[in-house]
Amino acid sequence: MATINLSKLNDIIIPTNNGDTYRGNEGDDTYILVSQESSSSVSIIDTKGSNTIQLPEWSKVKSILVSKDAIRLTCDDMTIFTINGADKFLYDIGGNLTSNSLGSIKTFDEFVGIFDLEAPSEGSVQKATNKIVYDDSFRILYEVTVKKEDSGNKYYINNELSPDLSLSSGEKYVFDLNDSTASNHPLSISETKNGIHNEGVSVSEGISYFIKGYSKTEQEFSSLFSSDNTLENAFVVFEPSSSDTILYYYCLFHSGMANDAKILIDDYVEQVPDEGETLIAPTIIQVQNVGASDYKFTAEGLQANDPTLTLVRGKTYEFDITAGGHPFWIKTDQVTGSSSQYNEGIINNGASTGKLTFTIPDDAPSELYYTCQFHSSMTGVINIVDDNSNGSIITTNSDSSSTPPPSYGYSLELDLAFDNNQDFILTSGYDL
């Protein structure tokens, strides 16, 4: 073991020599932590100047040990970095001075707090974790491997056979497909179990594919997977929407690799029938905008612009909305804006894309309204009944005897474009 003494200038150091200690002198030094291809252990000590630890994009942390003035990070491939005088450092998450980039800067306490820890006044605390740096923040990491089971190859996520995953909307999650066993099994996500193998498609919103740090289309991403290819920095990043409920991960090449695994969003509780009970699937109603003038509805083979809808108490309806910039509200009064919301039995009221689910309560009023938040002409009546066995969901306004829509307090007819939607010290063996 050796000690490498740095210069008195502002040094940029990539500490890679196994067993060595890097000792900083005067100057504002930056240490870029890069994992090695095999297990190694590196120490850093620097108490002079204003110094920074950088963890570049895709850096992983598998465990952290903290004392009042030191940190030990176990990173990918069991590379261990011990930082003495850690309370004197700043921590740059996502930055990399070799490419002149800065990320999110944290103090010692803030950095430790990312892992839900506090530096103790004496002794040390340790925590196993599974996080990866993406977009200047630590994200939850799902490491994907593939093992052969009796029924064929199956996905394992963090060493568990095809588990259900619970994700939160607005958070970004990273699926790591760099293990050699996954090299011929590109993962994607669909609203349909088994995706394209079951007449479904992959989701198009909130999902990104990366190889070697470069963003790819799904087709470009999957084309690089083969049994003969070794992947480098192959990741799928997914950010669920608040309109998502149940999704499914699956292999783009092979059917059945995720078994019946689900992705549940925002603690969504799937309806499961009691023993002997048959669960009735929701009735699907498609909703699209026609410019800024109408909503177009499709249900039970019928289609109309701004029709009267007839819904039945106790039944569940799923509005599949594709109307970017035109938030779809169910209300007690026929007005624009976001007032007068009716939210009983409704999930995702006010969505402009995604799914709005409406389970009609037994005490729902006999008349409600749907309306666009911004455009007064995009509106109609919802009749709530106890039985609709002799009628259809959609009734065109020309055939309806419903009272004409009242005037509005204000209107906005513009089709707004809303969417919810120095010196440089290199040591041997580094690989950026």
Image (cartoon, helix red, strand yellow):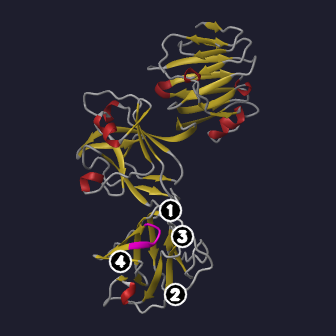
Tell me the crowding category of disc 1: few under 14, some 14 to 19, or many 20 or more residues within 10 angstroms, Cα based: many
Rounded to the nearest angstrom, the CA distance separating label 2 from label 3 is: 30 Å
**Residue linked to disc 3:** 413
Q: Which is more N-terminal, label 1 or label 4?
A: 4
**Residue linked to disc 2:** 365
- Mark 3 or mark 4, whichever is nearer to me: 3
Rounded to the nearest angstrom, the CA distance separating label 3 from label 4 is: 21 Å
Q: Which residues are magenta?
A: 291-296
Q: Amino acid at mark 4?
A: Ala
- Looking at the image, residue 405 sits to the left or right of residue 275; the answer is right
Residue 166 in picture, x, y percent from top left: 47, 53
Q: Amino acid at mark 2?
A: Pro
Which element type, helix, strand or loop, lies under badge 1? loop
Which element type, helix, strand or loop, lies under badge 4? strand
Q: Which is more N-terminal, label 4 or label 3?
A: 4
Which element type, helix, strand or loop, lies under badge 3? loop
- Mark 1 or mark 2, whichever is nearer to me: 1
- Contact between labelled residues 1 and 3, with CB atoms less than 8 Å apart: no
Tell me the crowding category of disc 2: few under 14, some 14 to 19, or many 20 or more residues within 10 angstroms, Cα based: some
- Contact between labelled residues 2 and 4, with CB atoms less than 8 Å apart: no
Which element type, helix, strand or loop, lies under badge 2? loop
Rounded to the nearest angstrom, the CA distance separating label 1 from label 2 is: 28 Å
Q: Is residue 364 above or below residue 245?
A: below
Rounded to the nearest angstrom, the CA distance separating label 3 from label 1 is: 12 Å
Q: Amino acid at mark 1?
A: Gly
